[in-house]
Image (cartoon, helix red, strand yellow):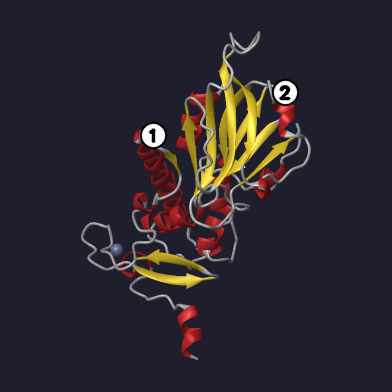
Amino acid sequence: MQALAERLETFVTGRALEGAQLLSFSSLKTFSPRVEDLYGQTLNAITRRAKYLVWAFAGGTRIVVHLSQAGRVDVEEPPKTTRPRGSVVRFIFSGPSDLGVGPPVAVGERAVLVREYGTQRKASWWVLAPGDDGPLEGLGPEPDSPEFAELIRTSTSTRRLHSDLRDQRVVAGIGRGWGDDISHRARLSPFASLGSLSAEERERLLAATTSVLDEALALERRRTGGLSEAKLGGRFAVHGRFGQPCPTPGCGDAMRRVAFESYEMTYCASCQTGGKVLADRRLSRLLK
Ligand SMILES: [Zn+2]
Protein backbone atom coordinates (compact mmCIF):
# COMPACT_ATOMS: atom_id res chain seq x y z
CA MET A 1 0.00 0.00 0.00
CA GLN A 2 2.89 2.34 0.77
CA ALA A 3 4.49 1.63 -2.60
CA LEU A 4 1.12 2.09 -4.27
CA ALA A 5 0.75 5.54 -2.69
CA GLU A 6 4.26 6.48 -3.84
CA ARG A 7 3.59 5.46 -7.44
CA LEU A 8 0.23 7.19 -7.56
CA GLU A 9 1.82 10.31 -6.15
CA THR A 10 4.23 10.66 -9.07
CA PHE A 11 1.33 10.06 -11.48
CA VAL A 12 -1.19 12.67 -10.36
CA THR A 13 0.07 15.05 -7.69
CA GLY A 14 0.38 18.65 -8.76
CA ARG A 15 -2.61 18.19 -11.04
CA ALA A 16 -6.13 19.52 -10.63
CA LEU A 17 -9.08 17.17 -10.21
CA GLU A 18 -11.30 17.63 -13.24
CA GLY A 19 -13.97 15.10 -12.51
CA ALA A 20 -15.02 12.02 -10.62
CA GLN A 21 -17.20 9.32 -12.19
CA LEU A 22 -19.09 7.47 -9.49
CA LEU A 23 -19.31 3.94 -10.90
CA SER A 24 -20.53 2.17 -7.75
CA PHE A 25 -22.96 4.36 -5.85
CA SER A 26 -22.69 2.62 -2.51
CA SER A 27 -18.90 3.12 -2.44
CA LEU A 28 -19.05 6.84 -1.54
CA LYS A 29 -19.60 7.08 2.20
CA THR A 30 -20.03 10.83 2.64
CA PHE A 31 -22.61 13.36 1.44
CA SER A 32 -20.77 16.56 2.29
CA PRO A 33 -18.51 18.07 1.10
CA ARG A 34 -19.42 16.96 -2.40
CA VAL A 35 -16.64 15.68 -4.63
CA GLU A 36 -17.73 18.30 -7.19
CA ASP A 37 -16.56 20.95 -4.73
CA LEU A 38 -13.01 19.69 -5.37
CA TYR A 39 -13.12 20.18 -9.13
CA GLY A 40 -10.33 22.50 -10.16
CA GLN A 41 -8.40 21.99 -6.92
CA THR A 42 -4.81 20.77 -7.08
CA LEU A 43 -3.92 17.45 -5.50
CA ASN A 44 -0.99 18.19 -3.20
CA ALA A 45 -0.06 14.74 -1.94
CA ILE A 46 -1.05 11.10 -1.73
CA THR A 47 -0.03 9.30 1.42
CA ARG A 48 -0.93 6.09 3.18
CA ARG A 49 -2.46 5.76 6.63
CA ALA A 50 -3.15 2.19 7.74
CA LYS A 51 -4.89 0.60 4.73
CA TYR A 52 -6.19 3.90 3.42
CA LEU A 53 -4.91 6.09 0.60
CA VAL A 54 -5.18 9.74 1.61
CA TRP A 55 -5.41 12.34 -1.15
CA ALA A 56 -4.78 15.83 0.17
CA PHE A 57 -6.07 18.75 -1.88
CA ALA A 58 -4.83 22.33 -1.84
CA GLY A 59 -7.91 23.61 0.02
CA GLY A 60 -7.45 21.17 2.92
CA THR A 61 -10.18 18.75 1.85
CA ARG A 62 -9.12 15.12 1.62
CA ILE A 63 -10.36 12.12 -0.32
CA VAL A 64 -9.75 8.87 1.53
CA VAL A 65 -9.88 5.59 -0.40
CA HIS A 66 -10.08 2.14 1.18
CA LEU A 67 -9.33 -0.57 -1.35
CA SER A 68 -10.33 -3.62 0.73
CA GLN A 69 -8.70 -7.00 0.16
CA ALA A 70 -9.60 -7.28 -3.52
CA GLY A 71 -9.24 -3.64 -4.51
CA ARG A 72 -6.85 -2.31 -7.10
CA VAL A 73 -6.02 0.90 -8.87
CA ASP A 74 -5.55 1.34 -12.60
CA VAL A 75 -3.82 4.40 -14.02
CA GLU A 76 -5.02 5.67 -17.40
CA GLU A 77 -3.34 8.07 -19.77
CA PRO A 78 -5.43 9.35 -21.43
CA PRO A 79 -8.52 8.61 -19.32
CA LYS A 80 -10.77 5.84 -20.58
CA THR A 81 -14.53 5.86 -20.76
CA THR A 82 -14.93 2.13 -20.20
CA ARG A 83 -16.51 0.66 -17.10
CA PRO A 84 -14.62 -2.56 -16.29
CA ARG A 85 -16.22 -5.07 -13.98
CA GLY A 86 -15.91 -4.09 -10.34
CA SER A 87 -15.40 -0.39 -11.12
CA VAL A 88 -15.78 1.87 -8.09
CA VAL A 89 -14.79 5.39 -9.12
CA ARG A 90 -12.66 7.11 -11.75
CA PHE A 91 -10.84 10.31 -10.85
CA ILE A 92 -9.84 12.45 -13.82
CA PHE A 93 -6.96 14.88 -13.55
CA SER A 94 -5.78 17.78 -15.66
CA GLY A 95 -2.31 18.29 -16.98
CA PRO A 96 0.07 19.87 -14.44
CA SER A 97 -0.54 23.54 -13.88
CA ASP A 98 2.42 25.89 -14.03
CA LEU A 99 3.86 25.62 -10.50
CA GLY A 100 0.34 25.38 -9.18
CA VAL A 101 -0.78 28.77 -10.48
CA GLY A 102 -2.85 29.60 -13.50
CA PRO A 103 -5.24 27.34 -15.33
CA PRO A 104 -4.39 23.69 -16.05
CA VAL A 105 -2.66 23.21 -19.39
CA ALA A 106 -4.81 20.31 -20.54
CA VAL A 107 -8.13 18.84 -19.56
CA GLY A 108 -8.63 15.22 -18.61
CA GLU A 109 -5.07 14.13 -19.24
CA ARG A 110 -4.76 11.33 -16.70
CA ALA A 111 -7.14 9.24 -14.66
CA VAL A 112 -7.06 6.87 -11.72
CA LEU A 113 -9.63 4.08 -11.74
CA VAL A 114 -10.42 2.33 -8.46
CA ARG A 115 -11.92 -1.13 -8.89
CA GLU A 116 -12.13 -4.44 -7.12
CA TYR A 117 -12.04 -8.08 -8.06
CA GLY A 118 -14.59 -10.63 -6.99
CA THR A 119 -18.11 -10.02 -5.86
CA GLN A 120 -17.59 -8.43 -2.44
CA ARG A 121 -18.29 -4.75 -2.79
CA LYS A 122 -16.17 -3.39 0.02
CA ALA A 123 -14.00 -0.71 -1.57
CA SER A 124 -15.07 2.65 -0.18
CA TRP A 125 -14.15 6.31 -0.31
CA TRP A 126 -14.86 9.43 1.66
CA VAL A 127 -14.63 13.18 1.00
CA LEU A 128 -13.52 14.78 4.26
CA ALA A 129 -13.68 18.45 5.18
CA PRO A 130 -10.59 19.92 6.91
CA GLY A 131 -10.44 18.62 10.49
CA ASP A 132 -12.69 15.63 9.81
CA ASP A 133 -10.76 12.35 10.16
CA GLY A 134 -13.65 10.12 9.08
CA PRO A 135 -12.50 6.48 9.00
CA LEU A 136 -8.96 7.53 10.01
CA GLU A 137 -10.11 8.48 13.50
CA GLY A 138 -8.98 6.11 16.25
CA LEU A 139 -6.39 4.26 14.19
CA GLY A 140 -3.43 2.89 16.12
CA PRO A 141 0.18 3.96 15.56
CA GLU A 142 2.05 3.04 12.36
CA PRO A 143 4.51 0.14 12.75
CA ASP A 144 7.54 2.37 12.10
CA SER A 145 6.66 4.91 14.79
CA PRO A 146 8.08 5.35 18.32
CA GLU A 147 4.51 4.96 19.63
CA PHE A 148 4.36 1.46 18.19
CA ALA A 149 7.67 0.46 19.80
CA GLU A 150 6.41 1.84 23.12
CA LEU A 151 3.20 -0.14 22.77
CA ILE A 152 4.99 -3.42 22.08
CA ARG A 153 7.42 -2.87 24.98
CA THR A 154 4.74 -2.00 27.54
CA SER A 155 1.47 -3.61 26.46
CA THR A 156 -0.33 -5.75 29.03
CA SER A 157 -2.85 -7.00 26.48
CA THR A 158 -4.26 -10.47 27.14
CA ARG A 159 -5.68 -10.86 23.63
CA ARG A 160 -3.99 -13.19 21.21
CA LEU A 161 -0.98 -11.61 19.58
CA HIS A 162 -2.43 -12.17 16.14
CA SER A 163 -5.65 -10.37 17.12
CA ASP A 164 -3.69 -7.33 18.28
CA LEU A 165 -1.46 -7.24 15.20
CA ARG A 166 -4.36 -7.20 12.78
CA ASP A 167 -6.53 -4.78 14.78
CA GLN A 168 -6.16 -1.39 13.05
CA ARG A 169 -7.04 0.38 16.29
CA VAL A 170 -4.09 -1.22 18.07
CA VAL A 171 -1.57 -0.88 15.27
CA ALA A 172 -2.36 0.50 11.84
CA GLY A 173 -1.31 -1.13 8.61
CA ILE A 174 -0.17 -4.65 9.49
CA GLY A 175 -3.21 -6.85 8.86
CA ARG A 176 -3.46 -10.60 9.16
CA GLY A 177 -1.18 -11.55 6.26
CA TRP A 178 1.80 -9.68 7.61
CA GLY A 179 0.74 -10.70 11.13
CA ASP A 180 1.45 -14.31 10.19
CA ASP A 181 4.82 -13.50 8.67
CA ILE A 182 5.86 -11.29 11.59
CA SER A 183 4.86 -13.86 14.25
CA HIS A 184 6.79 -16.54 12.37
CA ARG A 185 9.93 -14.45 12.01
CA ALA A 186 9.75 -13.48 15.69
CA ARG A 187 9.32 -17.20 16.56
CA LEU A 188 6.22 -16.37 18.61
CA SER A 189 2.98 -18.31 18.79
CA PRO A 190 0.08 -16.45 17.16
CA PHE A 191 -1.86 -17.45 20.30
CA ALA A 192 0.61 -15.78 22.68
CA SER A 193 -0.52 -12.47 24.17
CA LEU A 194 1.51 -9.28 24.18
CA GLY A 195 1.20 -9.03 27.96
CA SER A 196 2.77 -12.45 28.45
CA LEU A 197 5.90 -11.76 26.38
CA SER A 198 9.32 -11.35 27.97
CA ALA A 199 11.38 -8.24 27.24
CA GLU A 200 13.55 -10.26 24.88
CA GLU A 201 10.51 -11.60 23.01
CA ARG A 202 9.12 -8.09 22.67
CA GLU A 203 12.38 -6.89 21.08
CA ARG A 204 12.26 -9.87 18.73
CA LEU A 205 8.73 -8.91 17.75
CA LEU A 206 9.78 -5.32 17.08
CA ALA A 207 12.76 -6.40 14.99
CA ALA A 208 10.62 -8.89 13.04
CA THR A 209 7.97 -6.26 12.34
CA THR A 210 10.56 -3.84 10.99
CA SER A 211 12.39 -6.37 8.83
CA VAL A 212 9.26 -8.04 7.38
CA LEU A 213 7.63 -4.73 6.46
CA ASP A 214 10.88 -3.19 5.14
CA GLU A 215 11.46 -6.18 2.87
CA ALA A 216 7.87 -6.04 1.67
CA LEU A 217 8.18 -2.36 0.80
CA ALA A 218 11.49 -2.88 -1.01
CA LEU A 219 9.89 -5.67 -3.06
CA GLU A 220 6.85 -3.56 -3.90
CA ARG A 221 9.02 -0.64 -4.98
CA ARG A 222 10.76 -2.88 -7.51
CA ARG A 223 7.49 -3.97 -9.07
CA THR A 224 6.71 -2.11 -12.28
CA GLY A 225 3.43 -3.72 -13.35
CA GLY A 226 -0.10 -2.73 -12.45
CA LEU A 227 -0.88 -0.85 -9.30
CA SER A 228 -2.66 -3.78 -7.78
CA GLU A 229 -2.98 -4.65 -4.14
CA ALA A 230 -4.82 -7.81 -5.13
CA LYS A 231 -3.31 -11.18 -5.99
CA LEU A 232 -0.42 -10.45 -3.70
CA GLY A 233 -0.64 -13.70 -1.76
CA GLY A 234 2.65 -14.73 -3.37
CA ARG A 235 4.56 -12.07 -1.48
CA PHE A 236 4.00 -13.64 1.92
CA ALA A 237 6.62 -16.03 3.31
CA VAL A 238 4.19 -18.04 5.43
CA HIS A 239 0.69 -16.51 5.29
CA GLY A 240 -1.65 -18.87 3.44
CA ARG A 241 1.12 -21.41 2.87
CA PHE A 242 -0.08 -24.20 5.14
CA GLY A 243 1.17 -27.62 4.10
CA GLN A 244 4.28 -26.11 2.53
CA PRO A 245 7.74 -26.45 4.11
CA CYS A 246 8.61 -23.89 6.78
CA PRO A 247 10.92 -21.28 5.19
CA THR A 248 13.26 -21.23 8.21
CA PRO A 249 16.57 -22.81 7.07
CA GLY A 250 17.03 -26.26 8.59
CA CYS A 251 13.53 -26.43 10.10
CA GLY A 252 11.97 -29.06 7.85
CA ASP A 253 8.52 -28.89 9.47
CA ALA A 254 5.40 -28.21 7.42
CA MET A 255 3.40 -25.03 7.97
CA ARG A 256 0.10 -25.54 9.82
CA ARG A 257 -3.09 -23.52 9.99
CA VAL A 258 -5.40 -22.77 12.86
CA ALA A 259 -8.68 -20.86 12.96
CA PHE A 260 -9.62 -18.26 15.54
CA GLU A 261 -12.52 -15.80 15.43
CA SER A 262 -13.25 -16.68 11.79
CA TYR A 263 -9.66 -15.93 10.80
CA GLU A 264 -7.16 -18.51 9.76
CA MET A 265 -3.53 -18.23 10.81
CA THR A 266 -0.52 -20.01 9.38
CA TYR A 267 2.30 -21.00 11.73
CA CYS A 268 5.15 -23.46 12.19
CA ALA A 269 4.88 -25.60 15.32
CA SER A 270 8.66 -26.24 15.46
CA CYS A 271 9.60 -22.55 15.17
CA GLN A 272 6.76 -20.89 17.05
CA THR A 273 5.03 -23.10 19.60
CA GLY A 274 7.72 -25.48 20.84
CA GLY A 275 6.22 -28.27 18.75
CA LYS A 276 2.71 -27.84 20.14
CA VAL A 277 -0.11 -28.09 17.62
CA LEU A 278 -2.62 -25.32 18.34
CA ALA A 279 -6.20 -26.43 18.95
CA ASP A 280 -8.47 -25.50 16.12
CA ARG A 281 -11.75 -24.61 17.81
CA ARG A 282 -13.58 -24.70 14.54
CA LEU A 283 -12.60 -28.36 14.15
CA SER A 284 -13.30 -29.17 17.81
CA ARG A 285 -16.81 -27.78 17.43
CA LEU A 286 -17.42 -29.99 14.43
CA LEU A 287 -16.28 -33.05 16.38
CA LYS A 288 -18.66 -32.50 19.29
ZN1 LIG B 1 9.78 -23.86 11.17
Return the residue nearer the eye: 99 or 182.
99
Q: Amino acid at mark 2?
A: Gly
Which numbered disc flags the more N-terminal residue, 2 or 1? 2
Specify the farthest residue to the right: 32
Residue 34's x, y, as percent? 75, 34
Residue 19's x, y, as percent? 64, 28
Q: Is residue 105 visible?
A: yes
Residue at horizontal 48%, vertical 60%?
Answer: 198
Q: Is mark 1 within 8 Å of ligand 1?
A: no
Residue 234's x, y, as percent? 34, 52
Instruction: Return the residue at label 1.
Output: 221
Specify the farthest residue to the bottom: 288
Residue 211 is tagged as: none
The quarter holding residue 55 reads top right
Secondary-structure class at tag 1: helix
Q: Is residue 200 visible?
A: no
Residue at horizontal 46%, vertical 67%?
Answer: 264
Looking at the image, residue 248 sits to the left or right of residue 106; the answer is left
**Residue 231 to residue 227: above or below:** below
**Residue 202 to residue 13: above or below:** below
Badge 1 crowding class, 10 Å Cα cut-off, few under 14, some 14 to 19, many 20 or more, is some
Which quadrant of the frame does ligand 1 lie within?
Answer: bottom left
Residue 59 is tagged as: 2
Tell me the CA gap for discs 2 and 1: 30 Å
Q: Amino acid at mark 1?
A: Arg
Return the residue nearer the eye: 260 or 147.
260
